[in-house]
Image (cartoon, helix red, strand yellow):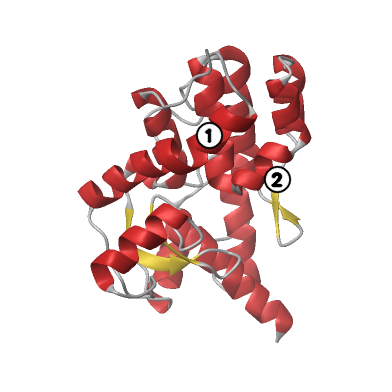
Amino acid sequence: MAISTASPAGVRFIAGHESPGGRAVTRAYRCPAGVITIGHGFTMGSKIFAAYWRSKHGRALQMGDTITQAEADTILERLINEEYGKAVAAKVRPAKQHHFDGASSTAFNCGPGALAWKWAQALANGKVSDSAKLLRTTAVTANGRRLAGLVRRRDEEANLIEHGRYTARGPAGQPTAVSQTDAEVREYQQQLLALGYDIGAAGADGVAGAKTIAAVQAFQKAHGLVVDGIVGPATRATLIRALDAKRGS
């Protein structure tokens, strides 16, 4: 019998990838593609979220809007089970819980259309190892650039599907939605340098030292973000958009 709802561990897995430590992004921001986003990666592209938001506010999500942690957590579970997970159950028909949870994470991040891709077809056909191998190289770019955070997410989703590993492989105690590995830190250091920020004499070395943190804070202050020196979803998306704007000017 196919699994049709996410496990608590599966919900936490998705929340951890969408929000720092599972803590919802409480103020709306624009993702790298320019879509207004809030909470655990919610956009008006989700039918359930859009209906909820319009029923509460009488309009679409706007910049400056806020959401509470409790509200975001409730909506996330609904989205997984009633929208993205529903599509997983119908198209992949997973017989194991970790297959459902891993596939739901990818569908949540990439959209239900991802369930027509080769990795999902392989999983639906019981070719678990093939599915995981394909998933590791699927949807790891944004605006034509390979992003370290997406590479890590796909790898962790593949490990969940193939081996049932719900634990992220980042530094102990660090939320997966935060750019934290050497490659991820180096990536945003290079972005800060390109935008004219001083990150210290060592340059883009993959170490988030005092100069790098100060540069992140300066960038956050200049763009109306929470000034905490942490590169989570909102800061990462704003960095990409700022760099795209500079390149296009």
Does 136 sit left or right of 49 as displayed?
right
Position in image of residue 94 (x %, y %): 58, 20
Residue 172 in view, yes or no: yes
Residue located at (64% from left, 31% from top)? 91
| Residue 202 appears anywhere in the view | no
Label 2: element kind: loop
Crowdedness of circle 1 by 10 Å Cα count: few (<14), some, many (20+)?
many
Q: Quadrant of residue 20?
A: top left
Q: Which residue was labeled with disc 2?
A: 139
**Mark 2 / mark 1, whichever is N-terminal:** 1
Kind of residue indicated by mark 2? Ala
Quadrant of image for the C terminus:
bottom right
| 227 shown above or below 42 | below
What crowding class fits label 2: few (fewer than 14 Cα within 10 Å), some (14-19), or many (20 or more)?
A: some
Residue closer to the observer: 97 or 206: 97
Disc 1 is placed on an element classified as helix
In this rendered view, identify the residue nearer to me: 43 or 140. 43
Q: What's the CA distance linking mark 2 and mark 1?
A: 15 Å
- Which x, y percent locates residue 42? 43, 55
Residue 128 is left or right of residue 175, and the answer is: right
- 70 displayed left or right of 220: left
* Amino acid type of the residue that numbered disc 1 sits on in the rendered structure: Ser
Residue under the point 58% across and 38% down: 106
Above or below for 106 versus 244: above
| Mark 1 lies on residue | 104
Q: Is residue 62 left or right of residue 45?
A: left
Name the spot of residue 163 as percent of width and height, x first.
59, 13
Picture disc at residue 233:
none
